[in-house]
Amino acid sequence: MALNILYRGPAERGQYWQTLFAQNLPQLNWHTWPDVADKDAIDMLVCWIPPREYQQDYPNLKVLFSIGAGVDQLKVNEVPEHIQIVRMLDPGIQQGMTEFVSMSVLNIHRNTLAYVNMNKQAQWQQLPQMRTAEVRVGIMGLGNLGQGAATGLLNLGFKVSGWSKTAKQLSAVECYSGQEQLTAFLQQTDILVCLLPLTDETRGILNHHTLSCLPKGASVINVGRGEHIVEQDLLERLDQGHLRYAILDVFAKEPLDIDHAYWQHPQIWVTPHIAAITQNDSAGQALLDNVQRYLNNQAMLGAVERALGY
């Protein structure tokens, strides 16, 4: 029996992937939502956010693929146990995230935000510049994206540490883990990068207490999820001078409201969720490889551990 896969997402990407699958797995039937003649036949669903009634509409669904690195939008705890959940491990996403994190850390390190503000005042002033090796960058979340970002920062000469829920060992990275080591990790971090998955445990993890554990003058880069930050606590720590800068790419509500305090804040740099965008070619190949693994009864890369939520 042929495998049936249903795609729900941007049309251009769907057309690219459909062609890719037709060339490499011609025995597979590709469907584009909502045009499905036989919903009972659908084995796999590829999407960012599933259709509202997907569990009832596609009763024989076996695999739910996220087209992005995250799976919190799929509401993992509501997906039936018999459906495998697989996140996207796309080399293109990892490369994009590494570039964005490196750019953001360098902009903070080289005082770019300060110079932009000074430009507006026609102010000519050279600011003190620390050596790269003196700057301590801490990454929260040491999964695929966090490890890529750590490598990029190490190559630039920064001192890199990392924190994760479970213990990790990475070359040249000082690793911390668990709640008992979170404070120690934060206390030695000059630039904090949040790349955590969003779970019940990580929601609101960047709050008054944890932000206060950072050294005075530290900065925050959030490329995880907007819900990781308690917004009012971040604004307070910036306004009171404890934090220096925040570069934010993700928000609890997107698009960000035009009257949100972030927009006009002189110490905040907002980008519209563009740190790492799914690439049609590399992501399509990653999806194709995983479907081939499924057909060969092999474990798929990026399979979600439900107990962890990612």
Image (cartoon, rainbow, N blue to C red):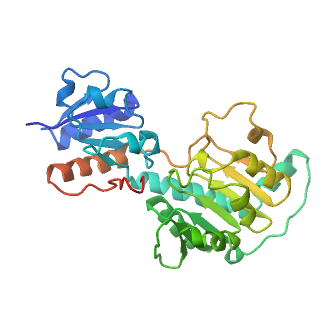
Residue 63: x and y, percent? 26, 43
**Foreground of the two, 177 or 1:** 177
Q: Where residue 1 appears, x then y in whole percent?
A: 7, 37
Residue 9's spot in the image, x, y percent?
39, 32
Q: Residue furthest left?
A: 1
Which residue is at the front of the view, 54 or 266? 54
Q: Is residue 151 left or right of residue 243?
A: left
Q: Is residue 75 left or right of residue 267?
A: left
* Residue positioned 52% across, 62% down in the render: 141
Work out whether residue 189 or residue 208 is closer to the camera in this orientation and state it: 208
In the rendered view, would you say 201 is above or below 22?
below
Q: Quadrant of residue 83?
A: top left
* Residue 131 percent coordinates (x, y): 73, 75
The residue depicted at 68 percent of the width and 64 percent of the height is 191
Residue, x 81% and y 61% (percent of image)?
242
- The answer to whether 282 is drawn above or below residue 7 in the figure is below
Q: Quadrant of residue 279?
A: top left
| Quarter holding residue 154 | bottom right
Q: Nearer the viewer, residue 170 or 239?
A: 239
In the figure, 100 relative to 232: above or below? below
